[in-house]
């Protein structure tokens, strides 16, 4: 793991935002040899407490991840996310071109699992409501570069809404797509409002696999 301190995008007395690399899980699990938790001690930056992730990004998703530096801040940030007041912008390369240039995908989601294929999220009218705004901002061949703004924060929301809602899975998605190549989904921007301080704002540059796919920061 590279020095995680080189990936700091924002820091103050109660928060740190890092640019999480793709391939690194936020929390350890049976299929992960290492996780961000192994590196959190490096992010104390002079504090006695180890920072804690406020939310999560999928292992193969890169970009902005908020960490709290004390328990009180953690509770406030977690409430902000739960109330839907944290503003998140994602960028993804999709396999295919959505039929409409922009719009809102509204598919409720639920979790299913089986011994053979493990678990995944699927559209289900009786599931938890989920909405994602999207806009096509670039094309190369049969691939589209799409900006997503989730209105809710369900597990795998953007990935399922891209695949099932738009009919265009995220490139490289190992669960909802073909799993060929890197997963091209990136948490580009994060804004977390605060009552007594300026909002936390961060932007993570597009990682190399996007440029290798022909897409860069121009026009974002």
Image (spheres, rainbow, N blue to C red):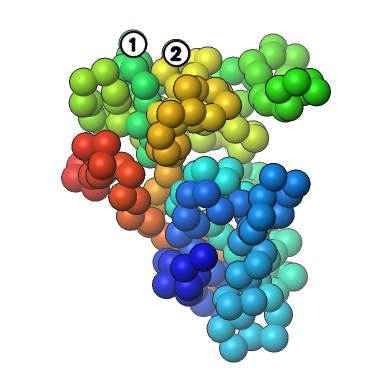
Give left or right: position of 216 versus 190.
left
Q: Earlier in the sequence, mark 1 or mark 2?
A: 1
At horizontal 34% and vertical 51% (from top left) the residue drawn is: 207
User: Quick one: label 1, few (<14), some, or many (20+) residues within 10 Å?
Assistant: few
User: Where residue 170 sits in the image (x, y, percent)?
Assistant: 44, 28
SS label for mark 1: loop
Pointer 1: what residue? Answer: 99
User: Quick one: label 2, few (<14), some, or many (20+) residues within 10 Å?
Assistant: some
User: Where residue 100 sits in the image (x, y, percent)?
Assistant: 33, 14
- As drawn, the label of residue 167 is 2
Which corner quadrant of the image does residue 133 belong to? top left
Considering every residue shown, the one lying at the far right of the view is 115
User: Where residue 165 sits in the image (x, y, percent)?
Assistant: 50, 15
At horizontal 42% and vertical 18% (from top left) the residue drawn is: 168
At horizontal 25% and vertical 44% (from top left) the residue drawn is: 211
Foreground disc of the pair 1, 2: 2
User: Where residue 150 sits in the image (x, y, percent)?
Assistant: 51, 35
Considering every residue shown, the one lying at the far bottom of the view is 46
- Residue 130 in the image: above or below residue 164: below
- Residue 142 in the image: above or below residue 218: above
Q: CA separation, marks 1 and 2?
A: 9 Å
Which corner quadrant of the image does residue 44 belong to? bottom right
At horizontal 30% and vertical 31% (from top left) the residue drawn is: 145
Give left or right: position of 100 versus 3.
left
Which corner quadrant of the image does residue 214 belong to? top left
| Residue 80 seen in the current view | no
């Amino acid at each position: 793991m590279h020095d995680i301190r080189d990936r700091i995008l924002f820091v103050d007395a109660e928060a740190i935002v890092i640019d999480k690399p793709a391939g690194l899980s936020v929390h350890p699990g049976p299929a992960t040899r290492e996780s961000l938790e192994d590196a959190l001690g490096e992010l104390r930056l002079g504090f006695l407490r180890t920072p804690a992730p406020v939310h999560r990004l999928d292992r193969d998703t890169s970009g902005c991840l908020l960490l709290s530096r004390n328990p009180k801040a953690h509770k406030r940030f977690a409430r902000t996310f739960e109330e839907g007041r944290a503003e998140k912008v994602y960028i993804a390369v999709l396999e295919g071109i959505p039929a409409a240039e922009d719009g809102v995908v509204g598919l409720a989601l639920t979790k299913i699992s089986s011994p053979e294929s493990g678990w995944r999220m699927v559209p289900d009218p009786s599931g938890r409501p989920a909405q994602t705004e999207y806009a096509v901002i670039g094309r190369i061949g049969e691939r589209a570069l799409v900006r997503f703004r989730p209105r809710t924060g369900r597990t795998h929301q953007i990935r399922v809404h891209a695949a099932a809602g738009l009919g265009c899975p995220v490139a490289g998605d190992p669960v909802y797509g073909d799993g060929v190549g890197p997963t091209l989904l990136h948490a580009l921007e994060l804004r977390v409002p605060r009552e007594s301080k300026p909002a936390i704002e961060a932007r993570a540059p597009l990682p190399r696999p996007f440029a290798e796919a022909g897409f860069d920061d121009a026009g974002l």
